[in-house]
Every structure is written in structure tokens, then in C-alpha cells.
Image (cartoon, rainbow, N blue to C red):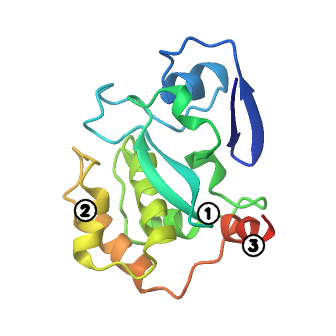
Amino acid sequence: MIKFLLNQKMCQVSDLSPNTTVLNFLRQEEAKKGTKEGCASGDCGACTVVLGDVVDGQIRYTSVNACITFISALHGKQLITVEDLKSKDGALHQVQQALVDFNGTQCGYCTPGFVMSMFALSKNTPSADKHAIFEALAGNLCRCTGYRSIIDSAMALAEQDHIVDAFERLESET
């Protein structure tokens, strides 16, 4: 049995094929369509989700390609999707708002993946420099924009004071 947190809800999965990817699980079993399938080979980043795992007593957030990550990799971890970022009152997460403020989208297909990569970066490296931002976003492709507006939004996010969000508040309670 595979046990993990999905967007603050405990999930137990035992009846899926071991070849089920996180992407297929999210879209087919959980009806979460925010995570996109672009290439199905881990190259484009449209399917990026974030895994939270306890490392040395602290939660470490890692962005992963859901299209090539098998469901078994979730055991004992927290799976965060783009659907879970907005607050209960519907307000956008700071990462999402930064992309809006800097016009970091065009068609929007790749946006959830960029959002999740930027989320993981902001949780692990709050004052990221340009090099860290380039590294964090290296696995995300966008065919519609030059990357300037996306990079600008990530830079603005890195310049903000410490971001306190629902995930940070939950960390202190666990």
C-alpha cells in the first residue's frame, strides 16, 4: 500500500499498476487536470509537481516530472499540485501572482509546470539568485514566450520578504 499526502489529504493507493505514473494518477484517478502532459518523456516540464519530504527534520520540496515518476515514489511524501496553491479564499499563491504581475504566460499550457518549479525554488531557496532561478527552471519549456517575463517574475519573487503560505503554517504544526 502506498500512503502519501495529496494536497493536504491522506491518500492510500493499493489497487493501481506499479507502472502508473503520477501524471496518470492525478488526471485519471483524482480528476486533477492542472498538471499537463506535454511530452510524456520528462523533457518539457508541463507536468511538474512538487514532492515534500522530511530531510534532517525539515521539509524539503523537490520539483519532479509527473509523467516519468511512478506512483510508488510518493510513499511517505507530500504531493503538491498546482490546484493546491491558491488559498482557501481563492487568492493566488505568491508564485502565481508574480507570473500574473509580470505577464509570464501566453497560451498558459506550460504555466502550471513553471509555477510548481518556482514554488519549490521559493520554498527551498527564498533569496535565489539568477543562476539558481535558471537552474530551477531549466526543466521547463515554453514555446510561446521568450523566457524574460518568466525569469522576471521569479526574480521579483526572490526579492520578496520571506513567503509565509499555508504550507509554511502546516510545517510548524507538524
Q: Mark 2: which amino acid?
A: Glu
In the displayed structure image, the side of residue 43 where residue 161 appears, left or right: right
Q: Mark 1: which amino acid?
A: Leu
Between residue 108 and residue 172, name the one nearer to us.
172
Mark 3 or mark 2: which is in front? 3
Q: Quadrant of residue 102?
A: bottom left
Image coords of residue 77 (percent x, y): 62, 45
**Badge 1 is on which residue?**
92
The number of callouts visible is 3
Q: Does residue 6 sit above or below 33 in this rendering?
A: below
Query: How busy is the neighbourhood of tag 3: few (under 14 within 10 Å), some, or many (20 plus)?
Result: few
Residue at the spot x=64%, y=77% of the render?
164
Q: Quadrant of residue 110?
A: top left
First of labels 2, 1 by sequence position: 1
The answer to whether the residue labelled 1 contacts the one labelled 3, judged by CB atoms less than 8 Å apart, is no
Give SS at disc 3. helix
Residue at the spot x=67%, y=27% of the render?
30
Q: CA distance from mark 1 to mark 3?
A: 22 Å
Mark 1 or mark 3: which is in front? 3
**Badge 3 is on which residue?**
172
Image coords of residue 53 (percent x, y): 57, 53
**Badge 2 is on which residue?**
135
Residue at the spot x=28%, y=27% of the render?
41
First of labels 3, 2 by sequence position: 2
Q: CA distance from mark 2 to mark 1?
A: 24 Å
Image coords of residue 101 (percent x, y): 44, 72
